[in-house]
Image: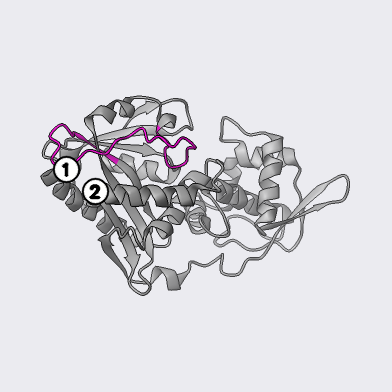
Amino acid sequence: MEIKHLKIWYSWEKQEQMIDRLVGKVGLTRVRATCFLRLWIYAIANEGQVKPPLFQLIFPTTAIICTHRQASDLFYQDQDQGSDRSAGMMLDKLAALGLIEKIFDGNTTRVKIKPIAGILEPDSSESSVELQLDQFNPRCDAIPVANLLTGNYNWMNRNAEAIPHRISRLLRGWAKDYTTGMRVLRRVDNLNPVGFYLLYPTANESEANFFTSPNKSLHLSAINEQDPFKMASVGDENCLSVFIRSWMIDANYLEKYRLIFLQDAQKTLQRMTLDFPNLCDLHTLIIHPDYEKLAAALGFQKTIQESPNSIYWMYLGLDRFLSLDMSEIQF
């Protein structure tokens, strides 16, 4: 089934909404969620019980034939890379997560989508929870935020086993040096963080990293213990750049709280200019594809990118960011 046929069965907008809902559930990264959704639509179409377009997904009742070659064509047809082997591994991962059942009779592989309670409807109990903006608390927030951020790196299929521990340790170290640029969006009922951003004042000696290979700056997910970016000390007049090392909101709250989170970031940057009077540059590393559209809507421009589909640097002048009326931005 080609991409254009997937859209006929289930609109692009509905696909995006469902992927956003799936990400983070039962171990689903965005890549896995996209592959699972495409397989789901393919299974509905091949079962032949309904006609397009679908206004809501349904769970097929039968297993459908899906070879590794067919899965590869389905998963990777709009990408520059992807193989039958990687498609088979993706099917195995989806089966391990309990999303599909694989049936092999010695000759043919059949796949059945498993019914999952609550997956077809948004979690209204989550989206209705009241949230509040707050300063990052390294004693209580480091580990929950680390687990929240880990999904940003999982989608690249990197080894993420030790990432939460590594991130929590780094967050506590950065908070000890300068906590002003670390903010959370937390639930009012249990105080758990569901959003986080980190604005990192960068020492002048580290600025050259913004113009080099993006892969060299993946400190949170890298094995190398040496951070390529040194934090500037309060009052450093040579500090010109802020590195947006993180910006993330749980998908359940993104639409409702994205605006106030961005407005809060503007206020935080205003406070940071009191500590670093010559700040003028904003740099961010686009690690997760979800945030490319957001950065572009705000006016960030790509700078350094190694190859298509890779991570890349984006830049925006601080004054331009501070002058934005966030309520007027079309996200």
Would residue 250 be visible to someone looking at this image? no
Q: CA distance from mark 2 to mark 1?
A: 8 Å
Choose between 134 and 117: the one closer to the eye.
134
Residue 27 to residue 237: above or below? below
- Asked if the residue under mark 1 is in contact with the one under mark 2, i.e. CB atoms within 8 Å, the reply is yes
Local secondary structure at mark 2 = loop
Q: What kind of secondary structure does the magenta stretch mostly adopt? A: loop
Q: Label 1 is placed on what type of residue?
A: Val
Q: Is 236 part of what is drawn in magenta?
A: yes
Residue 98 image offset from top left, x and y in percent: 67, 59
Residue 248 image offset from top left, x and y in percent: 37, 52
Q: Label 2 is placed on what type of residue?
A: Tyr
Numbered range of the magenta stretch = 217-243
Residue 129 lies left or right of residue 82; in this view the side is left
Say which quadrant the N terminus sits in: top right
The image quarter containing residue 69 is top right
Residue 234: which disc?
1
Choose between 317 and 44: the one closer to the eye.
317
Q: Which residue is mark 2?
A: 178
Residue 144 lies left or right of residue 9; in this view the side is left
Residue 137 to residue 1: above or below? below
Choose between 48 and 300: the one closer to the eye.
300
